[in-house]
Structure formats: structure tokens, C-alpha cells
Amino acid sequence: MSDAFVEVRGASKAFVGVQALDNVSLSVGRGQIHALLGENGAGKSTLIKILTGVHRPDAGEVLLEGTPRHFRAPRESIAAGIGVVHQERNLITRFSVAENITLEDPPTKFGLFDEAAAVVSTRKWLDLLHLDIDPRTIVSRLSVAQVQLVEIAKALSLESRFLLLDEPTSSLTPHETGTLFEVLRRLAADGVSILFVSHKLEEVLSLCTHVTVLRDGRNACESQSLAGMTRADIVRLMIGREEAMFAAPATSVRLATPALELVSVATSLGHRDVSLQAFHGEIFGLYGLIGAGRSELARAIMGAAKITGGELRIEGTPTRIRDVTDAVRRYGIGYVSEDRKGEGLILAHDIASNIAVTIWHRISRFLGFVSDGMQDRVAAPLARALDVRTPSLAQRVGNLSGGNQQKVSVAKWLAASSKILIIDEPTVGIDVRSKAYLHDLILRLSRDGAAVIVISSDMPELVALADRIGVMKDFRLVETFDNSRNYGASSARIMQAIHG
Amino acid sequence: MTVQTRLRAISRSNSFGLFVAILVFVAAFHLLANGFTSKVNVYSITRSIGIDGVIGLAMMTVLVTGGLNLALGAIGVCSAMGVGWALQTLGLPIWFSMLLGVLLGTALGAINGLIVVTTRLHSFVVTLATMSIFFGTMVLLSGSNGFNELPHSLTGFGRMRLFGMVSPLLLVMFVVAAVLFFIYRYTAFGREMLAAGANPFAAKLSGLPVERLFVSCHALCGGIGAIAGMMASLRNGAIVPSMAGPLGADWLLPAFLAPVLGGTLLAGGGISVLGAVLGTVFIAVISSGLYMLQLGEFWIQTALGLVLLGAILLERGRAALALARSTRR
């Protein structure tokens, strides 16, 4: 144990009424890539917050190179050499990349910020990640994936001896993920210890050497070698039972008229010549690299961006959608955003309002009268049907786990009885159990007659779910094919369409 | 919810805290300041609660959007001047003149809202500009002459004393508060305004007409501001351009104090009508008490400024607390 760089011994932490951590231990050796796994609510975040000095444990201790440390604030843990890439973005979006990366220790000349020096040192870290962006670029102009990589570059720039990465790949493409992993392996070879938190077990298995699994605030396993462990072993540790393998059964009927049809559509966002059909009872999967224009296409369909050419047809009728209100209320289109917290939900409001937001105008009586009771009559059955785990519908959505939040974002479209549903990255940052549930839910929705378009960067997910797959590249739809649900064949076809 | 948890929730709420603070200050001033609870003083307190309460409620309707309305005072005065013109120059009936006044306020508010929504500028700069524009136009049109021959029935209403000590303006405030409470709590329109204010992106993608709702919030603010303007005229017994200070800016302190004290979120989407009313009562009690203790006007202004700062810090603290509670794991 003496070569452990970071060690947590018997940490416990309770919050009002909840024992978040109960005697949890973890030991990350020098140069080790260590996976920290667990479902949402298993206690991962609490453990991370103890390591980073946000929380102090009620019992137990954190040791760095064998010495007990008591971090009272995040900056103390950073000073001790712990670099963190949080799940949430923490860059100052109005600053440039270079300004962000050199924020803690800006280079100066005559007491003024020395931009040239900052750009040079920043480029070094970007190059390490094969990230080809100008350090002078303002962060708000970067894509989600680029921002993610800049965060990682920033953590690297602090020359930390210990790197904690919380879901670092959630918005990266397979290619970008590959690059990141190369860098991490190189760092580990140089003696940097890495704690890698992820929901993507395939990544964990390919990258990490050791694993700690938490379940219900306790160690399900502690600092165990991953050698010889399979995906199934890990899942059993995480959920305490076997994972049911999931593959959507093929759909039987396809109606003649598509619910939604695009005929060589061009948009103000830059799409050209996009033609696709989404049928009732069918799941249409949309794959593409980050920046291929998938979410933007969804926005255009929703009326949030202008369609400048071609034709959009709903149930066969050429249609002009004026704005989002029109799309939702008149044409029954629903959109579950990939940015659940930013634009999917109203975190400060309760579950009932978040579900009923789409239909207040419809359930209201004389003078627009809507009571809590009327709202609950719509929301309660849906929350129950979708298995949203909460003591009360008056619970704030911000207090729910990611999986439950996603169920609420879907529930509001069920309330609106949307006929066409676009679901963008349905399971990003969601634990294994909720993920399986959501897959099943999406399938049920489509088989009940909705036309579902699933946008996903998770290729296994898309191949398991979709009846047909469309591949986007550079704001065009480059390929559409019937999905055989054979992962090898379908993934090869997708990669061929993108890279071939 | 059981009775117990409900009681606990109430005792922890912001409004309950304000209520206790009001009782404490009333008791303290009753003991310390001679004549604080006299009929004359109670009358004057209820009158300011009436007027400042409506001003605070008006601001609250636009704080819902996460924005603000610096032109509130200007709109109030402009609308009151419009009523004076309709009454005195055109000789229109009272009810009709007042209706015109409210419509004028609503229209001016809607102009603010339209500019904010179409330019996507922050309402701070927009209403800073319109404050001067509205007020300046009004001064140009009126030649800065007020209207001091209001009908007796109107001035009589302003001077009425219910039970010898309650101003009828207080009742007007209660009516406005009740209507707003109903709107936010029991109508689709109110719920949609709150949702749009709390997270405009999510609201838009849920199909809410966010822009239209924001314009409505500003229009509502203007309409209520017009009512406040007429109430202030009744207190004066005349309608004069200077009744809310230069550019109507004298209204700003009570306008922000009441809702913020009452727990309305400056970030938008969170309001409390009861809180705003209690906030106004709190301010009126403090101002009057300090006045009775013979402190000068600027001391009172300083105290109110400190209360506003304290309330904002308290709001920050509450937000931090809510965040800490929600990041349990």
C-alpha cells in the first residue's frame, strides 16, 4: 500500500437524513488508471467532493503519499496537486482558451497579462491533446466537445500528479475519446495517477487497470485489478444483479405516409439537401460526429431555426412551421434536448410543473384557470408510469438524479401526446439501470404509434434501438439504411459513411 | 403533506420571518416612539403601504422575467398625467379616464417589453432609456403643468378614513395583490410567465411563446404602474409631473425593496405575492418608526438602502443554501 499516491480510508459522510458514504475506501497507486464506478446516487460524487475539498468526511481520512490531509476548500486540494475535470463545465465562456488555461497563474510582463506567452504555453497543452484550435478563440464559440477537451487541457496544465476525470467523454466522439485515452496512458506512464469516473463500461475496460465500485454508499469492491473482469462482472457489482441484454425487436408494419418527411431541406444553420422520413411506430436513429449538425437539424424541425429550402411534410402535407410553439401545439412535435439542465428542464420548479408546462394552455378552464390539482391529474399518472422516483410531485426537478430528470423531460411530451418525438442523446450521464429503462420506454413509445427520432453518439445504443439509421456529416445526411441490429455490420456501415 | 410538515414549512418560509420581524418592530416602535400607533400615524402607514405595495407588485411582475423596469416611475407618472388630461381637459367620466390611464401604462410597458424582446438587450439599458423618453415626452406634452382640479368624489376617496385610521388605498393594494396571486397561482398565463422567466430556453423548447410572455410581463408591470400612479395622485390631491421625483426615480427603492425582501428571485421565475406585501409593510413600519424617532429623511433612506442590500445578500444566501441542499451526493 506504500506506493499508493492517493488513498481514502473508511470515509463516511451523511447529509440531512441520507447516509451518502458509509466506510468507503479507495487507493490509487502511482501511475495507475483507476476507475470509479457506481450508479447515480451510489456516492461517487460525494467521494469526489471529499477528494477535492468541497466536503469534509464525517469519519475516515484522505491520504496523499501516505500523509493524512484535511482539505478545507477546493483550492487546497488543487495546491496539493489534485487536478479535476468536473462533469459540469467550469470555463469562463467569455474568456479565450488561453486566458482560461492560464487563469490560475497568468503569465505577466510589466505586471500586465502577457497574451503571447499565454498563447505559447496554451498551445503546448492543446497540442498534447491533438486539439487544433487557436488559443485566442473565445470559449463560447467552441463546440461542446472542444470545450470538454479544453477543460482537460487545463487540468493537465496544472501539472497535477493526480488527475480526477468525472465523465470526461460524455460529449466526445469515439475518435476524440481515443485521442484522450492515448494522452492519459502517456501521463500514467509518466507516473501521474488517474481516477476515471464514467458510465461507459466499454471505455473503462479498455482504459483502466483497477476499479472501485460503489453501491448505495458502500464499497461493492475496492481497488481491485480489472484483469480478467468482464463487463458483466462490473455490472453485477454495480447493480447487484445481472443486466438484461437489450435489443429492440424489429418493427412489423410501416405505414405508407411518413409522420415527418424532409425533402432536400436546407436551413439557415447550414444544412443542405437533407431528406429523411420518420414513420409512426418506428425509431429513426441519427448518428454523426459532434458538429455534424444533428441537434441543429432537430432545432430546424422544431421551428427554432429557419428552413430555407426544400420541403417539410407532416403526415404527407407540406407544412411551414413558424416557431416552436407552432411545432409543439399545432403539429405535436416534441424535442428532448441533450442539454437537460440548460434547456430541457426548469430545475428550480417542481416535477408537476415541468411535466404540465406543455399543456397548461390546454387543460385550463374559464379565464385560463389551472389549479395544482388539475396539473397533478395529468402529471401524477405519467410520473408513475415512467417510474420517476420521488416522494412528491412538489419536489424540485433540480434535486432529482439524472435518470429521473430524463424521465421528466420525456414525460412532458407524453403529456402533450406528441406524435413526433425527437430525443437528443437520451442517456447521456445516466446510470445503467435508468438507461435500460429509457431504452425500453423509447421502444414502447414508438410501438405505441409515435414517430421517434433518436439522436445519439452512443453507437451501441443506436444500433440496439433504431429501426433505420441515418448518418450525418457536415450538415448533410450522407447515408440512410435499415438497421440489422447486428452491431458489427451496422457500425461498419456507419464508419464507412463517415470516414469512407 | 401532514399538518406538521406544513407548519414546519411555513415557519421556515421567508414570509413567516418577515411577519415576525414586522411584529417585533411594531412592538418596539410602539414602546419607543410616542404616537407610533396613533390613528393619524396608522392612517399614514396604511396609505404608504397601499401605494408602495402596488409599486412593489408592479416591479415583481417584471422581475419574473429575470429583468427589471427602471421606467416604472416614469410610466406611473405618465399614466396619471394621462388620466388628469382625460378628466380635466377632455372632461371624460372618471371610470373611463382611469381605464385610459391603465391602458396607457400597459402600452408603455409593452413598448419596453417589445424593445427588450426584439433587440435582446438587457432590460436595464432599455428601461433606463425609456425612462427618460417617456418622462421627457410627458413633460413636453404637458408643459410640466399638473392637474389640480380633480373631481371631488376622487379626492374624497383618497382622503377617506375607514374606521378612522385605514386608508382605502390599502384596499386597492389588496385587490391588486389578490388578482396577481390568482394569476400566478391559478392560471395557465401566470404559470407560463413563471416558467419562461425561470428558464427561457427550456420554456421555449416546451412550446411556450416566451417572447410574447415577456412582453406581457412588461405590459402587466406598466398597467399596475399606472394604478400606482393614480394612487399617488390621490394622496397628493393633484396630478403633478414631479410627484415621483426626477424621471420617476423616487419609486425605485420601494419597487425593488418589497419584492426582494419578500423572496422574489432576481434571477427570474420565482415570486411571492404575500412576501412582496409583507415586504412593503415591513418597510412602511421601519420608515414610519424611524421618522417618529425623529431621524432625518436621509437617515431613513440610508436605512432602507441597507435593508435592500441585506435582502439581496439574504437572497444570495438562500440560493447558496438551496444549491448545497440539492448537491447532496
Image: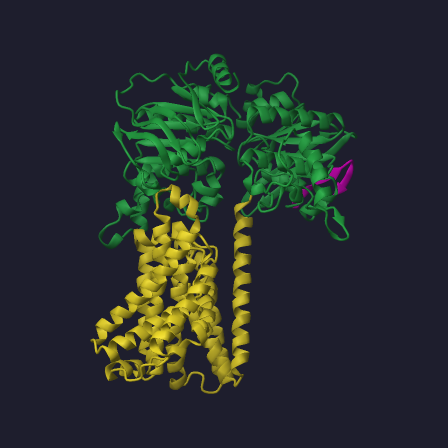
Task: Kindly indicate the quadrant of the structure image that contains residue B16.
Answer: bottom left
Q: Which chain is green?
A: A
Q: Is residue B161 rendered to the left or right of residue A394?
A: left
Q: Does any portion of residue B10 appear in the rendered image?
A: yes
Compared to residue A374, the image places residue A226 above or below, namely: above
B234 over A480 or under it: above or below:
below
Q: Say which of B145 and B298 sits in front.
A: B145
A227 with respect to A253 (left or right)? right
Question: At 65% across and 21% down in the image, what residue appears?
Answer: A226
Q: Find residue B313 and report its horizontal and vertical position in percent.
A: 55, 62
Residue sitting nearer the eye, B234 or A40: B234
Question: Which chain is rendered yellow in the image?
Answer: B
For the image, the number of numbered tags is: 0
Magenta-highlighted stretch: main secondary structure?
A: strand
Q: Is residue A57 magenta?
A: yes
Can residue B53 be seen in the rendering of this structure? no
Q: Position of residue B147 (x, y in %)?
A: 31, 81
Q: Position of residue B153 (x, y in %)?
A: 24, 82
Residue in the foreground of this view, choosing between A103 and B90: B90
Find out whether residue A103 is within the magenta segment. no
The picture places residue A477, in percent across and down from the top left corner, at 42, 24
- Of B160 and A15, which appears nearest the observer? B160
Give the extent of the magenta segment: A56-69
| Residue at 29% in and 29% down | A313
